[in-house]
Structures are given as C-alpha cells and as structure tokens.
Amino acid sequence: MKKILSLVVLCAISMTSMADEGMWFLMHLKRLNEADMQKKGLKLTAEEIYSINNSSLKDAIVQFNGGCTAEIVSATGLVFTNHHCGYGAIAELSTPEHDYLTNGFWAKNHAEELKPKSLYVRFFVRMDDVSKRILGLVNDTMPEKEREKIINQEIAKIEKENSENGKYVVSVKSFYNGNEYYYFVYQDFNDVRLVGTPPNSIGKFGGDTDNWEWPRHTGDFSIFRVYADQDGNPADYSAENVPLKPKYHLPISIKGLKEGDFSMILGYPGRTNRWMPAAGIDQNVNYAYPAWVEASKVGMDAMKKHMDQDQAVKINYASQYSGVANYWKNRQGMIDALSKHKTSDSKRKAEKKFQKWASKTANKAEYGEVITTINRYYAATNEKARHDNYLIGMLRSSTFAALPASLGNALKQYADANTEKRKEMHPRLESAIRETYEKVHIPLEIDVLADELNLYSTKGGNISPYIAELAKQNNGNFKGSVAQYFTNSVFGSEANMLAFLENPSAQKIDTDPLYAISNALMTKYREQSPEQNQLADAYQAAYRKYIAGFLEMNTKTKYYPDANSTLRLTYGTIRALPKDPRNDAKVNNYTTLKGTIAKYKPQDEEFDLPQKLIDLYEKKDFGRYADKNGHMSVNFLSDQDITGGNSGSPVLNGNGELIGLAFDGNIEAMAGDVIFDPKLQRTISVDVRYVLFIIDKFAGAQNIIDELTIVE
C-alpha cells in the first residue's frame, strides 16, 4: 500500500469545516490546536492541558467504570459524573427500605459513603505513536488473519513493555481502520464509593420523553469518591483505605456563561463511524437499526409491566431498563436523522469522487476495486444484520437468553470433576449463583424471554434452527412454553441451581430446556461461515485501503481519527439553537428552574418533582448560584463534537474551570456519529451552578460544598 500521511498531519480538521468539529488527541494539541483555541478564548497552554512530567488538566479526567467520563473536583478524590453514569451503582446499593434511586442519598462524612460491589475509575497517564513499529511487520500481500495475528503479537509486546510489571494498564488502539496505531497507558483505582446523588425526580427528570431532546431540565449528576491505600496507590476495597490525593483537581466556576463563550470538553467518546461507507449507512437505516428498535421496545414493555407492580423489581431492573431505553431512542433517532439528511447520498458522492481518482492508471491496481468490494460485503450481509440486531436486542433485554449458556459449561465441568476439584470449585460457583439470582425476578424474565423469542422467530429471518423448531412446535407462541421451561430448568431459580451443586450431572445441563435455548442463541450469535469470513476479510482490507486512499487523494485536507474510547478534547462555544417556544429562557442556549417547574406533573414517573425543590423555586432561594439575571440555570447548549462515552465529561471555560457536565445531544443531530452537522450539532450539559444548588440548598450537604474549589 502506498505510504499514507502521518496522523500528526491527518489528525486535524478539514479546513473548510467549522472549528467545533473534531475529537483531538491531547499529545497533538500544541502542534494542531493551541493557537486556534487561544484565539477563540483559551487562556491555558497545551502543556497545562496535557503534560507527562507535570500535573495538568488531563490528571483530573477519568474514565468512569469503562463507559462514561468523570472529573476529579477536590483534593480528596471527589468525583462528579452524570446521574445516568452512576445509575447502575446507585441501583445496586438501593433497596425498598433505602431507595436511593427514588429518594437520593447524601453522605455526611467519609464513613457514610457507600461501596458498590464493582466500580472503578481509570486515569490517563500518557500515550505514544507505534504505527511504524507495528505496520513495519505487515504488508498488503498477507491474508487478513495472518496480518491480524502478527499485529496482535506485537501489541502484546508493547503492552507488556509499558505496564511496569502490572502497575499500569496499557492498551494499543488502531486508528483509521488499521492505518495508524497508538498505545495508551492508564492506572485503575477500584475502590470508588457513592457520596451523593439527587433523587430520580431531579437526576432523571424528563425520563425517556425528554431523552435526546431540547429544551432539557435534568439534574443529571452524581458524586463519588476515589480511595487509595495509605501510600496513594490503587487498592481493593478496605476500611483502611483513604481518600485519594489526586495530582490535579478542577476548580469550579459559578460566574456563569453567555452566547459565544469559549468552552471545551475532555472525555472518552466511545465510537464514531465517520468513515462509514454509504452502503453501511443504508444497512443500518433499513435493516439493523429497525430490528434493534423493535427488539428493544418488546423487552422494555415486558420489563416495565413488572417494574410498575413492585418497587423492589423496579429498583433491581432500573439500570438494565434505562440502558435498553436509551439505545432504543438513540437508534430510532439515528434512523430518522440519517434518512432526513440523506447521509448515505452525501457519502455516495464522496465515494464517486474517490472511484474516479482510484480508476486512474497510477492508482487502479491499489484502489480500483475498493468500493466494489465494500458494496459487495454490505449487499451480502444486509439480512444478517437484521437477524443479528433482533438477536442482540434479545440478549440486551433478557438475562436468560445468555446466562444458561455462559454458566452451563462451568456447571458441566463441575459435574465431571472429582470430589477434590468439586470442593475447590463449589464456593466460587455458589457465590456466582447467589450474586446472579439476588435481584432476578423470574416472572419478569419469563415474559421478556417469551416475548423476545416470539419476535425473533417471527421476524429474525435465518434464525437458529433449534428456535425455529420450537416455534413450529408451539405455533409461534412461546408464552406457555417458556414458563414451563423455567419450571423444569436447573437455571429456573436460585434454589434449583444450588440443588444442582449438591447433586450435579452434566446430562442435566445437556438436556436442560433453558440451556438448550440459550446455547442455540449464543451459537447462532457467534456463527461465522467460511463464506462470511472470506467476505469479512475482503471487506476489512478494502475498508483500510479506502481510508488510506482517501487521505492520499486529499493531501491538502486535514482529518481527525474516529472516536474509540480514548481520551480526546473537543472545543467550541456556548451556542444557541433557534428560538423555541417551549423554552422560557431569553436565549435558547440555556434552560431555567422556572421551565422545570412548568413541566411538573405530580405523581408522574417522568415529570414529578420533590416538594422541597418547588419550595426553593417559589422562594427564589437560589443562594449564590443564581444567574446574574436572577434565574436558576439548569442546562445549557454548546457546539462541541461529542458522542456516547462523553457522558459525565467536564465542560470547561477558557481558564480550565468546570462550568458543566455533558450528558446528551440533540435528536436533530443524531446522525452525528456518522457525519458532523455544523449547524445542528449540540452538546447538552447540566450547569454546574444547578449541581451546586442541588447539593447545597436542596440537599444541605455543606460538607461536599466545603471540599470544592469554587471560583466566584
């Protein structure tokens, strides 16, 4: 393959695009972004944002439990993130007697802080380019499997070399679909405890109705603390651990914001696909996403029926339901936005230009068949994409679609083991079983699995042969059958599972009805025919060449890499959308507590509010957190380039002071993961003044306020 330009050159944005687009590597800020950012209002240097040898902004930014972003805001390890990011941990710690999701929670001291079973934060230490080292070992004549093997072997060496004997977690990531490689060094802290959370009626105000919508009025924040051992090192939970003393923590500004103010966001955007071909977009819009949406809705409806009847069930399934609901609306929004903006047509125009360039004599041998190969792959996998997304929707909604298959092999090994080995395995298996079934509600699981199987067997297309046979036997209605399967299954209850440990038999697992279903589903999920593998290998090689060729074709244009859960910076301004009659604010770049109260619906699951918040509003008791114009700001808009994974990311002003927590985007720009819309793309954030108002005036948690560095 022809040599492509270095990522140091390619990592910048198109000169013809707006400066708000782009998710930038911190190590390149000095060369690519510093001057532009300072021109727009940044008061810091690139070194103050990212430094290896000195404390800097990056030392206050953490990845939260592998899926969100959070920020250190005190000298004693206090962490701010979104309420929806902490939702799973809050739900885990909640019971009907101590329902922190519904009622909120505020620790008055360190001793009252609560430890979830599993929660960690990841600090970014450094990164470096290893493209030449890795790509020097491979060439275009290699089969994809051989190429992958060689690259993975070298990645393992790089990760080991930089881990310092396990002190650090090292991850080598591919960029431009294998045209560039960088390694990232992290340090994980596993003792993270809940400090405070507003009640659902504040932290999740608006629910699914307002999700991805503007105007928003959501207090989407929660507070945790990172603990370390006595020497400040990562350590498993212990009563002897102490609050972490971080290298850096963010000061918090309550000076307010206005249209056009510079702002930036640091965080861990999860995944964008801005190089996705037109045929891939068409596949998502017409096959994959509709199946995902339908399967998600079926699972949500089955869950909600039981959640509405029992508060304990509602608490136990709150996090799972919320996750399914979030992507349900996301995928529908993607369908609508990609269709409305004719994104695939735009991509196809770019591909047509590429094909014209690729057909030139000098380029034809290398790039001439790239687009044809890509299109052939999508045409051959459209129906599989539909099937896979019905199946994925089931796996996300139904615990028992995957659980029996994942536990079954371990149980068979236990059954076949000798007495001594069983004694060794028994405690671990018993602990896993009790933990798994602790919050499982079997009637709900029966309905979810039955409804998902009904949908899958009807619309999945080339479904699992075993499921097809069951559907034939029960005339396409799994309702009664699934209930009977649970009754007769080892996996049907905790009691059945524990009884199996006392009288194990591998044959019981092999003939178990739920194991048979789960195993059939997971086998189908992992299924790859030789033809599919061949198609996938040809596609990967062609896609990699397409990107390399596109960059070679456009040497005067600069680009940034797709998001892939690595730390990035994006910058822009506080920026309004056109005036909206639903928003009482004078400028449609913020919302107010007045607007929150206007949405209030007593006893409504999505729009209820605590009486104390209403009382504070009526008294206009906003303390020092009121805007200079007298209102209490709740959420605000800016035009940075973010995506999933940026939830909880700090929004910073030009001085590097925290002004808000990013938590959402607007549904009009839902195509943003595939194509950036400079006119419509917005980040929705909770104003840090509202966060502090809730902590201080609503919760009375002065101990938390006292820890913070507040700039007035």
Image (tube, grey):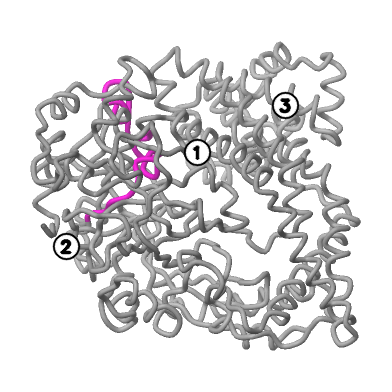
Q: Quadrant of residue 524?
A: top right
Write down the region rendered in magenta. 78-102
Badge number at residue 432: 1
Work out whether mark 2 precedes mark 3 in sequence or the reverse, and give the earlier one. 2
The C terminus appears in which quarter of the rendering? bottom left
Badge number at residue 62: none
Q: Amino acid at mark 1?
A: Ala
Label 2 Cα neighbours within 10 Å, binned few <14 / some 14-19 / many ≥20 = some
Mark 3–mark 1 distance (CA, rounded to whole Å): 19 Å
In screen coordinates, is 149 left or right of 495?
Answer: right
Badge number at residue 512: 3
Percent position of residue 508, x then y: 71, 28
Q: Answer yes or no: do the residues labelled 2 and 3 have beta carbons within 8 Å?
A: no
- 291 versus 60 height, above or below: above
Q: Nearer the viewer, residue 323 or 709?
A: 709
Which residue occupies 56% across, 35% down? Answer: 329
Q: Which residue is mark 2?
A: 75
- 257 versus 621 height, above or below: below
Which residue occupies 36% across, 57% down? Answer: 121
Q: Answer yes or no: do the residues labelled 1 and 2 have beta carbons within 8 Å?
A: no
Work out whether mark 1 precedes mark 2 in sequence or the reverse, and give the earlier one. 2
Mark 2–mark 3 distance (CA, rounded to whole Å): 54 Å
In screen coordinates, is 280 left or right of 504?
Answer: right
Percent position of residue 170, x then y: 48, 72
Q: Nearer the viewer, mark 2 or mark 3?
A: 2
Residue 4 lies within the magenta run: no
Work out whether mark 3 precedes mark 1 in sequence or the reverse, and give the earlier one. 1
Q: Amino acid at mark 2?
A: Ala
In screen coordinates, is 561 left or right of 109?
Answer: right
